[in-house]
Image: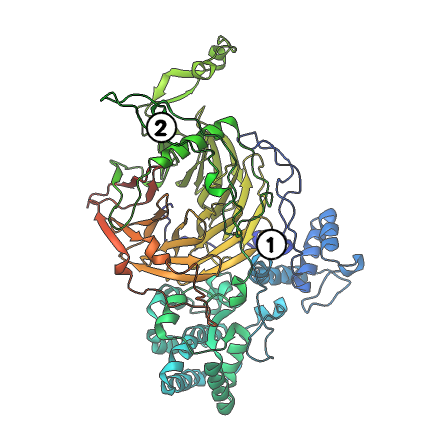
Amino acid sequence: MAAVPDEASTSVKTEPELLEEVKSESLSVPVTEEPALGNGHGTSPKAASSPLPPPLTTPEPPDRQTLLAVLQFLKKSNLRESADILRRECGLEPEESPALSPSGQPTSGEPESAEHSLLSRVTAGSAAISSTAAGGAPTTVQSAGKGALNSGPQDQPDVSAVLSAYTQQGDPALYEDYYSGLKRFIESVLDCHRAELSQLFYPLFVHMYLELVYNQHENKAKSFFEKFHGDQECYYEDDLRILASLTKKEHMKGNETMLDFRTSKFVLRISRDSYQLLKRHLQERQNNQIWSIVQEHLYIDIFDGMPRSKQQIDAMVGSLSGEAKREANKVKVFFGLLKEPEIEVPLDDEDEEGENEEGKPKKKKPKKDSIGSKSKKQDPHAPPQNRIPLPELKDSDKLDKIMIMKEAAKRVRLGPDSLPSICFYSFLNAYQGLTAVDVTDDSSMIAGGFADSTVRVWSLTPKRLRGVKSTADLSLIDKESDDVLERIMDEKTSSEIKVLYGHCGPVYATSFSPDRNYLLSSSEDGTVRLWSLQTFTCLVAYKGHNYPVWDAQFSPYGYYFVSGGHDRIARLWATDHYQPLRIFAGHLADVISTRFHPNSNYVATGSTDRTVRLWDVLNGNCVRIFTGHKGPIHSLTFTPNGKFLASGGTDGRVLLWDIGHGLMVGDLKGHTNTIYALKFSRDGEILASGSMDNTICLWDAIKAFEDLETDDFTTSAGHINFNENSQELLLGSYMTKSTPVIHLHFTRRNLLLAAGAFSPQ
């Protein structure tokens, strides 16, 4: 993963850009429509239809007021055909698209102020709509003023209520008394309830402060902040720093952080007993101010059972929106691997019977019947083979799989007593600023992205990098010769390094295709480029993001790739389409890391909103939301069997997730700085992590996941008691000399390759 600046999410979107997102996200459909897959690798992009079928599930209809506002905007822009399509998709009658007044009622006139008000309302509500359209479970938001504490899914609010969320509810001079009273109550309850109810402090503090600022009680707000900001958990320091800068009502307008707080409900997971204590206290004291904030801005996820401990709660909280709702992680996920095709593996000459040095005949090794021998039986957790269209295997792909099988037979078995050898590639004199690294699957090439907008490719073998000859030279070649593929390569221009020019900003990610014919790169210039490794030229520039693209990754099967950027959205692409096939919207901040599941049916994304999300490629829905990190998430990796996911971020922790149950199953603490690289060994025995603290840690993955596949470890609270002593899982730690580790790669024989740029102190 590229080294992304921490201040990545500071710019503000304009209203037309947000409106465009509302139109695409609220419909929850791919940008292109249905066709056949095509041959896959490297055909020129064209305005073709999507290889993926339209989503099978009908998305929940968004807010009616917002739909009518979008229809009005389309009408004013003379996009009547698009308006008609949107109206049919949402089941609206033709006469239901008149202009709206600021109060939400149809009017005959269309004054400029009314149109501006509608656009503002759509802008304010866009984040709430996207979280429902893209998420696996409907977002529960309650309209202002009425209703009990939330404990289940409800409808979304009127968008105008979001704009006026911070109306004056009480005497501003009493806000400190309200908060202090609740604090004294929580500190007086039993220890078993105190930890759970203490989760209320941060969201209540934020919304009470913003309410004072919104109603222009600036001195009271400053006093309130200074008195209580020190009581908040340390992992909210960055958020509090941003909050402290909002001292006037004008500062709140157009602020992204402000939009997040006002349009997404903060989720708290509390036991029923603790909830009853809180409810009884607020009713007895008639604390309407606290009660109103809880109703409007919080979502109480109540569970039956024993209250959670402070340690359990701290392991799961920390994101911008609190914890994930349990309903969000109950969708069935096909995490198994697809059945491998049956490919005959020929015997090598060294495997044939012959005589050794002593004159005795060698023992003939048993022949492996096929490369799919490990997957003859269909994995019960695997998706249907044709769930999404995948490219057909070419002859070169089959040969490569045969080579993988042969290499696997010579693979070193890793474990606590057999740690991998490490080969470190240090980029010296990287004055251009190394920002991204990737290595091919066969470890034959390495690519680096640099801050000077170039991409450099090196050969890691004695074989030099060769391009195809010029057109004039190609015309002289005998096309019928047996070695025609060798003759078309130009030896005169071969070299150990190739430099690729095309981006106009720092390159933040690089990714090789599985067949090693193509290379992806993403940049600050908002584009993802596809490069040919035969001609070392740019084939396509994919333009869908409006802001920097922090990451881009190829699918394990090629053809598809995913990108994520500062616009808070991840996009699924195909190499022969210049428009995205799916738009994954739901994160509240930059998407800075992406990774395909080994079966290519799912995509994992990590964000600066401190959450990890798992998206279904088939329909674009969010099927898992993982919370627990205390900082932006820069690295993701799946186990080879697809059952578990590891994530690392600026908090220096590696969290392990069970995809099937949607639960955290491990917390590995061994680094002191941002973790930019994570990789499981080929057999899944070892997890390697690389950090900006110049160290590589090796973890015992088998011990971390033991007993999780057989025991019923779920609880009503959605939490398990995993091994908190991560030092027991740490097998080894290696320190580099002034070289932060930004990429890790296991070769086919389980040699660990690491890469980073030397940074003299």
Characterize the local packing of mark 2: few (<14), some (14-19) or many (20 or more) Cα atoms within 10 angstroms: few
Task: Give the residue drawn at x 41%, y 73%.
Answer: 202
Q: Nearer the viewer, residue 466 or 118?
A: 466
Image height of 607 relative to 339, above or below: below
Residue named by callout 1: 25
> Percent x, y for residue 360?
26, 23
> Percent x, y for residue 217?
45, 77
Task: Give the residue drawn at x 60%, y 54%.
Answer: 25
Callout 1: SS: helix
- In this rendering, position of residue 613 left or right of residue 692: right
* Quarter-of-image position of residue 246: bottom left
Is tag 2's residue or tag 1's residue first in the polypeptide sequence? 1
Q: How many marks?
A: 2
> Percent x, y for residue 306?
43, 78
Residue named by callout 2: 364
Q: Nearer the viewer, residue 661 or 238?
A: 661
Q: CA distance from mark 2 to mark 1?
A: 60 Å
Q: Nearer the viewer, mark 2 or mark 1?
A: 2
- In this rendering, position of residue 478 left or right of residue 185: right
> Percent x, y for residue 176?
41, 83
Q: Amino acid at mark 1?
A: Glu
